[in-house]
């Protein structure tokens, strides 16, 4: 069993994976004085029994590392996974300064397409692997090189986002796309390995600007798309796909057990008509379940 949680943190992103191995992973953060105590307390509790933990920052935007210093001070980050960059900002916030400290420290591990590391995706006798793979960036790809140059010049950061995939053996698979933009995704379609994935978190918090192209969706064939908390007028709703919208659902917990994913949300009034009802009660506010598909449905 593994548990994935997507926090409702406003327009930012923050997730954790409590793996079914001796691993714990946090992906991005957007902490504030209002939510940090609650979230960090939960992260401490959830990660307490795990021997190895990592923080993955998909890209250097404030809404993906906001409050990093709050997290690092209370739950020290010893493994900081990041796309190698030299991003600069007009406004050096406290969070960005901590990001740069970690990025440029011995705690940093620079991720790229196909990278391997012990316990991320390599097991040994000490502990199993986390099930995480890095599908992007290809650091030699001309489109990424151009995006990285814009990042390092302080112009834009979205298209340096890493694409992260998590797969539970004989169970669900999940994908994170950071803030990749639609046009960029279209350019790299033939340069990234995409395969059927159970749950996909929509790029750029679900905005039109990060609409996942049809060329990707045909390969991913997701069973459910989770749409983030960008303002509703900016969202793309992926007609024809099952989805959960965090503007309405709040926090989303995905309890992955065997070939099932059971969904729970923090908003007790949220309902989902298209998920199977299996009367689960591991967490409050169960909204339904899905059975993992292994074959394409298109």
Image (cartoon, helix red, strand yellow):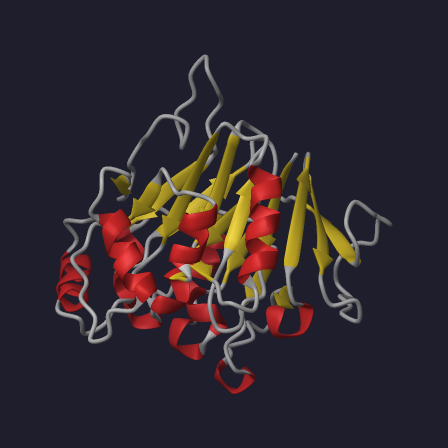
Q: Is residue 82 above or below residue 117?
A: below
Question: Where does the image place residue 86, in percent across and percent down from the top left?
Answer: 16, 57
Question: Where does the image place residue 179, in percent across and percent down from the top left?
Answer: 37, 66
Question: Where does the image place residue 1, in percent across and percent down from the top left?
Answer: 66, 34
Question: Where does the image place residue 65, in percent across and percent down from the top left?
Answer: 38, 60
Residue drawn at (79%, 56%) of the image: 286
In the visual, does 279 lie left or right of 137? right
Q: Is residue 238 above or below residue 280?
A: below
Residue 66, image quadrant: bottom left
Q: Is residue 39 above or below residue 21?
A: below
In the visual, does 225 lie left or right of 85? right
Q: Is residue 150 above or below residue 27?
A: below
Q: Nearer the viewer, residue 176 or 33?
A: 33
Q: Nearer the viewer, residue 147 or 274?
A: 147
Residue drawn at (18%, 55%) of the image: 85
Residue drawn at (79%, 59%) of the image: 285
């Amino acid at each position: 069993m593994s548990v994935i949680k997507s926090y409702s943190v406003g327009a930012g992103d923050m997730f954790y994976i409590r793996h079914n191995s001796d691993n714990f992973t946090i992906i991005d953060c957007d902490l504030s004085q209002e939510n940090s105590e609650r979230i960090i307390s939960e992260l401490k509790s959830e990660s307490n029994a795990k021997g190895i933990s990592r923080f993955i920052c998909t890209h250097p935007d404030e809404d993906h590392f906001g409050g990093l210093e709050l997290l690092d001070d209370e739950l020290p980050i010893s493994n900081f996974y990041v796309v190698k960059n030299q991003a600069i900002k007009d406004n050096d916030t406290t969070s960005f300064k901590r990001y740069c400290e970690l990025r440029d420290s011995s705690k940093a591990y620079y991720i790229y397409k196909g990278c391997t590391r012990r316990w991320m995706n390599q097991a040994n006798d000490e502990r199993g692997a986390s099930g995480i793979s890095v599908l992007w960036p290809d650091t030699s790809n001309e489109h990424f090189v151009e995006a990285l140059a814009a990042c390092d010049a302080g112009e834009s950061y979205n298209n340096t986002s890493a694409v992260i995939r998590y797969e539970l053996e004989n169970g669900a698979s999940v994908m994170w796309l950071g803030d990749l933009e639609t046009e960029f995704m279209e350019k790299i379609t033939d340069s990234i390995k995409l395969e059927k994935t159970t749950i996909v978190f929509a790029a750029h918090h679900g905005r039109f600007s990060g609409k996942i192209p049809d060329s990707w969706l045909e390969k991913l064939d997701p069973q459910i798309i989770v749409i983030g908390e960008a303002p509703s007028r900016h969202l793309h709703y992926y007609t024809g796909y099952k989805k959960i919208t965090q503007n309405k659902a709040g926090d989303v917990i995905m309890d992955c057990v065997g070939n099932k994913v059971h969904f729970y949300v923090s908003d007790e009034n949220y309902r989902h008509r298209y998920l199977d009802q299996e009367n689960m009660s591991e967490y409050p506010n169960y909204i339904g379940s899905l059975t993992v598909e292994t074959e394409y449905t298109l």
